[in-house]
Image (tube, rainbow, N blue to C red):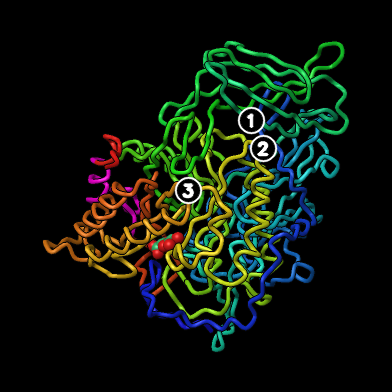
Amino acid sequence: MKLQHLLPILSLIPSSFSIPSSNTHARTLNPRQSLPPSNQSTTPLTIQLKPQSSRTRDLICLDGLWSFALGDSNDTSTSTPWTTNLPKGLECPVPASYNDIFVDRSIHDHVGWVYYQRTVTVPRGFQGQRYFLRFESATHEGKVYVNEDFVKGHVGGYTPFEADITHLVSPGESFRLTVGVNNVLTHETIPPGNVTVNEYTGRKVQEYQHDFYNYAGLARSVWLYSVPGEQFVKDVTVIPDVQGEDGIVRYTVETSSGTTGSIRISIRDEERIEVATASGRNGTITIPSAHLWQPGAAYLYDFVVSIVSPDNNLVDTYTLPIGIRTIRVTDRQVLINEEPFYFTGFGKHEDSTIRGKGHDTAYLVHDFQLLNWVGANSFRTSHYPYAEEVLEYADRQGIVIIDETPAVGLAFSLGGGVAQEGSATFSPEGINNNTQKAHADAIRELIARDKNHPSVVMWSIANEPASNEDGARGYFAPLAQLARELDPAGRPVSFANVGQATYETDKISDLFDVLLLNRYFGWYSFIGDLEAASAALEGELRGWERKYTKPIIISEYGADTYPGLHSVLGLPWTEEFQVEFLDAYHAVFDRVESVVGEHVWAFADFQTNLEIYRVDGNKKGVFTRDRKPKAAAHKLRERWSTGVEKN
Ligand code: GCB
């Protein structure tokens, strides 16, 4: 059992302090080892393009109220609720996390499978087409059943998966669709966790290291969609570049195996005027005098792929919005379109009352309005891939994204954001080879889904792993390499470093392109003493700057702030303290040349696990959970709206 000590070690630990840990199981994985094949035996990792309706495709949204029931067993071979109609009574909205919907603690705290069910009719018009069910996410594991049959499983709670049901249900027929969703986290899932059984009640309890509530269910949309029967576009990859005034688009199109038609490409500008064409499965296209996609000034072209039969009939067509921009990292800068870019913004969460992590377009638009109001130009999808609609919207709004995998909580010496007694993180009983495989799958699925988004300028493959511990290098070296190999556009690869892993103790930062540092001097250490905090922060940043020639983004800094709490003394938890805390950090950032960005933790207050140091969640938001500004929001607006000037 882990004993939690509320020790201030999220930021630099004084050198006299040592973390208790039994390192007996630590071992080093060979950094050169190639990664084992995917864990996903039932799921092809090629994620097909986000479904859309077009002249050749139909799209039906299956969102709404579904029947809902808790599973009574974790063994899907003995308990088979999908074979009949679920008991009448509970209905759950999709998309939404189920936890906060019902007034029922047994649902809120449930550990294991839950079941969603509804009737679906395949339209008669799908005759001769191929058709798929698409789940934008099932957190953290999904199993899909059509009537009595299991058709597809998927592990990983924040990326999409599909089931081809063409041969299971005929056009014009209805079927019972049941989806099992399991919220269990183990040492071999991403994110990791551990289920214990309470000795008095016999109830299962889900433990985990990360500091946000383990919301689960179908939190994103579910679709039924069709593509032409034999020949259809499966995937498109575009790599934008700029040469002088011209935009360059290298592309690859993947089609279904039966495709015999020819591939035609048409690129249209925002006025829908065709500006370039090409043919063939891959090639390079020039857009003369191209409009660039710029932060704060998005410009998107439509990349239209068509399959055309020999007699010139349209067989399939898919439209992908693309942006022309470059991204390059130098010794001390991140360049977007060859201009130095200074990141202002936040670490965020997909989180709101009642719906939990359920995707909500009203919150999406309002959050981006607030980003714009406060002068933020970017955010990190902490700590998991967000709904793809969020990235599409960022593409259109010119907001820059650091795109993160769900690999959070890979440090047993931290729990829910604070220090605790922990055993060695990287060990056969802990974060092990199977965790690494799941992590590799999470990277594969993130990049497969998001590789074409111009808003995405960087991958973050983990948040706050124990990068100071034995085994970290062996674990991370192949994953950093994998991310590089998978992104044809060569975006920078990074991870968010925890304060415990200082520039002196961190073992992996040389493997990455940009240093993302999460620091909490003045909060988890030196609480309330901003003079000491500033000195410690500056010492730490200068240490990183001396050791590495890499740009630094402070990917987290912040203080819990209870809205409406005030003090003329600027004491911790007050709105005044949050303002002074941010001011103190900014003064340091402005003096350190390699600092090229500041992401405050966090955009808004968010729900966490029940912890004695979290009152209805984490309160480091600059906005409350219902998006009201705290005093710090106004302060940030002053700084960011006029552009950050380095000394
Ligand atoms: C961190 C984590 C973030 C927590 C935050 C905190 O370092 O990355 O997930 O919520 O600290 O507030 O403790």
How packed mark 3 is, by other alpha carbons closer than 10 Å (few <14, some 14-19, many 20 or more), is many
* Image quadrant where one finds the N terminus: bottom right
Left or right of 82 on screen, residue 510:
left
**Can residue 631 be found in the magenta stretch?**
yes
417 vs 62: above or below: below
The number of discs equals 3
Would you name the residue on which mark 2 appears? 488
Task: Choose mark 2 or mark 3, whichever is in front.
Answer: 3
Look at the image and tell me whether residue 93 can be seen.
no
Point out which mark residue 239 bears: 1
Disc 1 marks a residue whose amino acid type is: Ile
- Asked if the beta carbon under badge 2 is closer than 8 A to the nearest atom of ligand 1, the reply is no
323 vs 406: above or below: above
Where residue 88 appears, x then y in whole percent?
Answer: 62, 59
In primary-sequence order, the first of circles 2 and 3 is 2
Q: Quadrant of residue 122?
A: top right
Where residue 62 appears, x then y in whole percent?
Answer: 63, 42
Q: Which residues are magenta?
A: 620-638
Q: 356 or 423, which is in the foreground? A: 423
Disc 2 marks a residue whose amino acid type is: Pro
Point out which mark residue 603 bears: none
Look at the image and tell me whether residue 204 can be seen.
yes
347 vs 498: above or below: above
Q: Residue at x 45, y 77 (%)?
A: 420
**CB contact under 8 Å: marks 1 and 2:** yes
In primary-sequence order, the first of circles 3 and 1 is 1
Would you name the residue on which mark 3 appears? 550
Left or right of 447 on screen, residue 205:
left
Left or right of 352 on screen, residue 642:
left
**Can residue 121 be found in the magenta stretch?**
no
Q: Secondary structure at mark 2?
A: loop
